[in-house]
């Protein structure tokens, strides 16, 4: 329990309320923890449960928004508890309902959900803890009336620094003090963000990039900035701070090179390098080796920087997507219908069907019902 | 049913009983003995070149065991269609679930075609699947090359080797079809078809039917030769033309069109392109190296289309320089 840093007052309040709740001295149904993300609300609930022998039944309100889903998830707990009370004091741990992100429940749109939470807390007799980032007093009147509110505050820079140093020590990381301080300043009291930044720095992402991670530009803006970037460093930082666009970026680069109209030798060279990048990307995803990203953060910027000399970026619909989603969409649908009939009627594999039977017999085989596929066959085999 | 299957001669003239099978006496005799008591049928393994009646025999056995309701108790799988052994395991599991053997139906039948397309790891897993389901299911495995089947599987099966069908029998079969369909043919043309297809009866019948279609009811040597000349589909020949002309733009579009429409995987497309390159005498050692390199990259990459276009550009660059 001592491992959760900061917010000592809040933690004390929490324990005291639970003590009184056990003696049935309180009016409220449960506790509502309020505070910004990443400051230890969830960690605290788990640490508390560990120390005092509770079994946490954790639910994220944003996953179970409707009244029905909540009842299915939590409704049974009340019943099982009355049975459990027979064994109480034996090996059985007491349950604790923990409902995170209750401010994700919209009092109007998820009508009934909040009432259900209150009902479950009331009828189950189980210790119920809710957590939220911000609670609007008007909209969540019912919650505030029925729950004891405890506020969690952002951690102080000093507290964050201690936390990071501990991790650096335990994980045996090689990170300079000035970097640590930079993270402390950037995280604004959010311990989770601080730990994430620390991890990114540890695998070689520059700290400037980490700071802008939250930016995540829209894809088009991202592409334009990449090609307008004045310096190499700008390209590096853009790529590192928009990791979610990497896959699309690789495909757009491929499209740009392919339709660039450069001499075939240049195209071959650029595509071969992209083939390397694609393989690296595949390894990162297939083997979940995120550490390899640091090589990609080197390869991609230098690729773009060189490509910029030959190609300008224009917003265009990529060619291969055109064939997948526009031109051959119907062909594919009809093909799949036919493929599903193949084993039943032809007793050959799809591969054999398309390479050995279709080229010679499609006119005979494919009726008007599959006109698009037939036209495609004409283009391919006719 | 809009696939006009009944018009395909290969299906129309597919034998329905063991006695109709041509020229596999050893297999037929052996099978008749095994099938005398159907409760005791072991797993079977059919090996032999294409078009010699392996799948046909498996289907005959299914009919023999279950009569007209055979489809209900038979699962047909093709190793080259199923993505990985896990998909096969799942399908076998679902198929044999809730099945209780009876005197009449002592087991269900699973026909796994092209079993030699599986890696040896997958075959080891297959062996487990066969063991787990042995109470409720019998397997008929079909392959071209017996040597590509791991020995633990071989030792669990009764093995039947099919051989290429001899010339006289192929010709007799084709004659019968022509008579039945009221199709005339030039003298020597059936022999010509045999020369091109050797003992592969499926290809022979397909060639016969295509030629009959072109010739309007008369099969002519000219048409047979024309058709055989088109072993590589038009799309590949066109692709090779674009490669030769250095038209990367058109080559790429055709490749997308073909891949997205056919659903073939990258390796299969590389194989087709290689055939095309051989046919037009463009497969230099340098080009072969490029193909091999990109087939390897394709397996390890994330996005097949990137690898294929990169390969195309490499080939064109190499041929342009040559």
Image (cartoon, coloured by chain):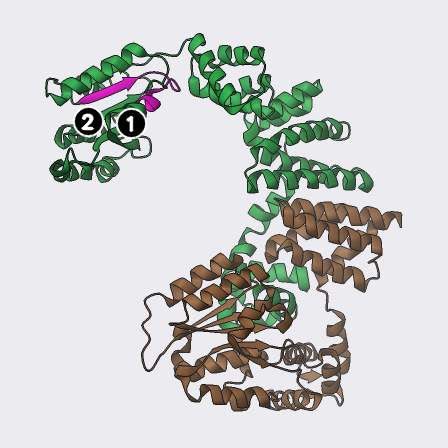
Chain colours: A green, B brown
- Alpha carbon separation for disc pair 2 and 1: 14 Å
Which-is-in-front pick, marks 2 and 1? 1
Q: Chain of mark 1?
A: A
Q: Mark 1 or mark 2, which is nearer the start of the sequence? A: 1
Q: Is residue A121 visible?
A: yes
**Vertically, is A28 above or below B319?**
above
Q: Which quadrant of the structure image shows residue B54?
A: bottom right
The residue to which callout 2 is attached is A127
Label of residue A50 in the image: 1
Q: Position of residue B178 (x, y in %)?
A: 63, 88
Q: Position of residue A154 (x, y in %)?
A: 38, 12
In the image: residue A90, left or right of residue A282: left
In the image: residue A269, left or right of residue A251: right
Q: Is residue A312 visible?
A: no
Q: Position of residue A34 (x, y in %)?
A: 30, 17
- The stretch of residues the image draws in magenta is A30-44
For label 1, count other residues whose C-alpha is less than 10 Å away and answer few (under 14), some (14-19) or many (20+): few
Q: Is residue A318 magenta?
A: no
For label 2, count other residues whose C-alpha is less than 10 Å away and answer few (under 14), some (14-19) or many (20+): many
Q: Position of residue B216 (x, y in %)?
A: 67, 80
Q: Chain of mark 2?
A: A
**Vertically, is A291 above or below B291?**
above
Q: Which quadrant of the structure image shows residue A151?
A: top left
Viewer-closest of B251 and B314: B314
Which part of the image, by quadrant, shows the N terminus of chain A? top left
Which part of the image, by quadrant, shows the C terminus of chain A? bottom right
Q: Report the residue at 62% width, 21% height from top.
A: A237
Q: Which quadrant of the structure image shows residue B74?
A: bottom left
Viewer-closest of A213 and B127: B127
Label of residue B228 in the image: none
Q: Report the residue at 66% width, 19% height from top.
A: A234
Q: Is residue A32 magenta?
A: yes
């Amino acid at each position: 329990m001592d491992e959760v840093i900061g917010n000592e007052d809040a933690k004390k309040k929490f324990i005291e309320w639970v003590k009184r709740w056990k003696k049935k001295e309180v009016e409220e149904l449960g506790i509502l923890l309020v505070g910004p993300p990443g400051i230890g609300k969830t960690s605290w609930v788990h640490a508390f449960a560990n120390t005092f022998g509770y079994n946490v039944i954790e639910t994220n309100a944003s996953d179970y928004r409707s009244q029905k889903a909540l009842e299915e998830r939590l409704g049974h707990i009340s019943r099982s508890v009355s049975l459990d009370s027979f064994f109480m004091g034996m090996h059985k741990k007491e349950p604790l309902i923990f409902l995170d992100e209750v401010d994700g429940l919209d009092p109007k749109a998820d009508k009934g959900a909040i009432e259900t939470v209150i009902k479950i807390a009331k009828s189950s007799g189980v210790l119920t803890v809710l957590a939220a980032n911000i609670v609007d007093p008007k909209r969540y009147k019912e919650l505030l009336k029925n729950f004891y509110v405890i506020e969690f505050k952002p951690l102080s820079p000093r507290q964050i620094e201690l936390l990071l140093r501990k991790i650096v020590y335990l994980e045996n990381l090689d990170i300079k003090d000035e970097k640590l301080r930079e993270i402390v300043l950037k995280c604004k009291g959010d311990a989770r963000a601080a730990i994430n930044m620390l991890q990114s720095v540890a695998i070689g992402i520059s700290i400037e990039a980490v700071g802008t991670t939250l930016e995540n530009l829209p894809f088009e803006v991202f592409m334009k900035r990449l090609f307008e970037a004045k310096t190499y460093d700008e390209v590096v930082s853009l790529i590192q701070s928009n990791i979610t666009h990497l896959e699309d970026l690789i495909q757009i680069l491929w499209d740009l090179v392919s339709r660039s109209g450069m001499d075939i030798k240049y195209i071959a060279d650029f595509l071969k390098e992209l083939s390397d990048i694609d393989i690296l990307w595949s390894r990162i995803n297939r083997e979940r080796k995120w550490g390899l990203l640091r090589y990609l953060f080197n390869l991609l910027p230098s690729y773009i920087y060189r490509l910029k000399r030959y190609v300008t970026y224009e917003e265009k619909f990529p060619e291969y997507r055109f064939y997948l989603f526009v031109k051959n969409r119907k062909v594919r649908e009809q093909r799949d219908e036919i493929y599903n009939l193949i084993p039943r009627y032809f007793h050959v594999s799809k591969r054999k069907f398309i390479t050995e039977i279709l080229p010679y017999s499609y006119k005979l085989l494919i009726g008007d019902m599959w006109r698009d596929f037939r036209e495609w066959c004409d283009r391919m085999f006719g | 049913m809009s696939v006009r299957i009944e018009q395909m001669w290969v299906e129309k003239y597919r034998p329905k009983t063991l006695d109709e099978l041509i020229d596999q006496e050893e297999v037929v005799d052996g099978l008749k003995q095994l099938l005398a008591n159907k409760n005791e049928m072991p797993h079977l393994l059919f090996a032999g070149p294409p078009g010699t009646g392996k799948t046909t025999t498996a289907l005959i056995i299914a009919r023999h065991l279950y009569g007209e309701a055979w489809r209900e108790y038979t699962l047909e799988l093709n190793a080259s269609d199923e993505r990985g052994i896990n998909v096969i395991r799942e399908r076998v599991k679902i198929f044999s679930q809730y099945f209780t053997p009876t005197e009449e139906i002592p087991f269900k039948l699973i026909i796994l075609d092209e079993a030699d397309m599986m890696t040896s790891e997958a075959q080891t897993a297959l062996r487990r699947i066969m063991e787990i389901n042995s109470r409720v299911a019998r397997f008929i495995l079909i392959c071209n090359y017996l040597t590509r089947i791991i020995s633990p599987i071989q030792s669990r099966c009764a093995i039947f080797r099919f051989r290429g069908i001899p010339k006289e029998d192929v010709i007799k079969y084709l004659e019968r079809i022509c008579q039945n369909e009221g199709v005339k043919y030039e003298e020597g043309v059936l022999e010509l078809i045999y020369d091109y297809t050797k003992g592969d009866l499926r290809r022979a019948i397909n060639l016969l039917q295509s030629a009959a279609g072109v010739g309007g009811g008369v099969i002519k040597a000219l048409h047979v030769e024309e058709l055989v000349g088109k072993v590589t589909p038009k799309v590949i020949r066109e692709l090779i033309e674009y490669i030769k002309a250095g038209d990367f733009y058109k080559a790429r579009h055709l490749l997308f069109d073909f891949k997205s429409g056919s659903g073939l995987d990258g390796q299969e497309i590389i194989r087709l392109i290689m055939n095309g390159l051989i046919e037009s005498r463009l497969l230099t050692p340098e080009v072969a190296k490029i193909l091999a390199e990109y087939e390897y990259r394709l397996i390890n990459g994330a996005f097949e289309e990137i690898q294929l276009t990169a390969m195309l550009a490499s080939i064109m660059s190499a041929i342009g320089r040559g």
